[in-house]
Amino acid sequence: MSGRTAWARNLKTPLRRFLATETGSAMVLLVATVAALAWVNVDAGSYARVWHTELAIRLGGSGVSQDLRGWINSGLMTFFFFVVGLEARREFDVGELRERRRVALPVLAGIGGMLAAIGLYLALNAGRSSAHGWGVAMSTDTAFALGMLALVGPRFPERLRTFMLTVVVVDDLLALAVIATVYAKDVASGPLLAALGFFALVPVAIRLGVRAGIVYFTLAAAAWVALFKSGVEPVVIGLAMGLVTYATPPAREELEHATDLFRLFREQPTPELARSARVGVASAVSPNDRLQETFHPWTSYAIVPLFALANAGIAIDGAFLKRAFSSPITLGIVLGYVVGKPVGVLATSWLVTKLSRGRLRPPVGWAAVAGGGAIAGIGFTVSLLIASLAFDGTQLEEAKLGILVAAAAAALVTWVVFRVTARLPGRLRARALLGTAETIVDLADPVDPDRDHIRGPMDAPVTLVEYGDFECPYCGQAEPAVREVLAGAGDVRYVWRHLPLNDVHANAQLAAEASEAAARQGAFWPMHDLLLSHQDALRPRDLVGYAEQLGLDVESFRNQLAEHVHAARVHEDFMSGVRSGVNGTPTFYIDGVRHDDSYDIETLLAALERAAA
């Protein structure tokens, strides 16, 4: 129950798909962490030998040589930060953060959380050599934090996950800047300038319209090697590449071109036309979406768990625990994450809201902000990466323990926050979780009761708008679900708007005009129901037959179809859909917000409940 007609199939990668992958990968990451701890405590020697194995890649007289742990930390993790950058850019281009004023508060909240965590760490380590490791207490782990938030957090506020994603990306961006500067060793200016030069060619290639992926991979690989040679941690190139990869919905012209190419292949199935059709379909989807589809599962289910397996192992015994829990390194990391992060995120959000007099406010309620700040205390991946750069020996082991304890404590605190919130009275709980921030409206043309076709109470608090095509099989599939949802949801008004896809459905335009001709005689909804239940019979004589069946004035009906009296009315609906970014049928809007999930009964009911809340 999630398909759309191929004319403009919505190929965006929604935030919920990103979060679903993160949720599943959090469990894999947890298993990898436990496996690392078990391995090192059973046979510490083999654990060390495996990850200290040297691996070199050489071309002629030059090359790159690291141990396996180094290749994972500096090499494979580049792809992890690349995916984080891709998702941040997608949200900035087409997601919740496309309204620019919404970016400011989560950015400042992320900075506030980092500063508070660093401040607590430095307070416990002032005057010690361990103060140099302050960067360990600053960053939030994307996979673990978002995954655990989905497991222990509330059911409704998806905006909280968007808010937290922005906070996490700010963390990662600043953490990578710290890695590239504070923890860089003996920086060589020549290779660093070369890396900047290679990366500067990337936006040039984008502006010139270069589509060949091998070009961007080569430039990124060259910049990575140059950064490695310069002494700067090369994972920063991953986030930078993700942030410059634009995300856009498929354009109608590109989708129609892809449809034409497929038709040519259908008529003459040759290898050349198959290749053209494949390229045409791929080019209709933004590079951001294609790359996320390719890399996100690999980074979440393979690379990050492998990183945990290589870095999370610490030998634990009574003496070590006693020493570690009195160590300022361990205590500074735990307090920084468990206390500093939530206090910093919450206090900064409150201060920005007050200073802006409410113009900038969190997209969710204050209980959700507090819970989001608490879950930001999971600093696993980047923290381990910085710890491996800042410490070695016993200090590194103490830092690792602090990171693991902080992650467990942060998850527990988050669970407590949301369990306490769940016990509040219904209306107060909704406000604590959802807040009062305005929702971004995607529907370009508001519902007009004097013009639109409306089914249900005119004054219903929730409005469901569907852009549909009477010949679209997915619209036919959605119709029973919509009818059952309307019967079960109660106070919902349902609006149908026409979006006939003439290039793929030959009879859709005339069927839409037939429904408007029936509307002239007060029979829009009976005709609407007949058309969707007889999608394989929408030729002119079929339409006239439906008019007879409904007892309409057939002569008037036939004349209006012949003269295309209602073509302009159908076109108005069509253009309102184009202005609203509709690129497939059926497309639903709930209170003006695009519904990108499936349209089965359970999913639609849950979405309508959220809107009512």
Image: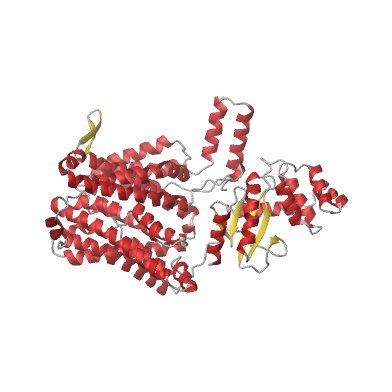
Q: How many marks can you see? A: 0
Q: Name the image quarter holding residue 310.
A: top left
Q: Position of residue 152 (x, y in %)?
A: 38, 60
Asked which colour scheme the image uses, the reply is secondary structure
**Residue farthest along the top direction in this orientation:** 270
Q: Position of residue 269 (x, y in %)?
A: 59, 26
Q: Position of residue 429 (x, y in %)?
A: 46, 71
Name the residue located 21 percent from the left edge and 50 percent from the top edge: 389
Is residue 127 something one can see in this rendering?
yes
Compared across the picture, whether 260 is left or right of 84 comes to right
Is residue 33 shown above or below 109? above
Compared across the picture, whether 119 is left or right of 261 comes to left
Is residue 135 something one can see in this rendering?
no
Q: Considering depth in this image, is 360 or 154 the residue closer to the camera?
A: 154
Name the residue located 38 percent from the left edge and 56 percent from the top edge: 146
Q: Position of residue 391 (x, y in %)?
A: 17, 52
Compared across the picture, whether 506 is left or right of 304 comes to right
Compared across the picture, whether 550 is left or right of 315 comes to right
Q: Considering depth in this image, is 612 or 53 the residue closer to the camera?
A: 612
Q: Name the image quarter holding residue 590.
A: bottom right
**Residue farthest along the left direction in this orientation:** 319
Q: Considering depth in this image, is 380 or 75 the residue closer to the camera?
A: 380
Q: Considering depth in this image, is 498 or 153 the residue closer to the camera?
A: 153
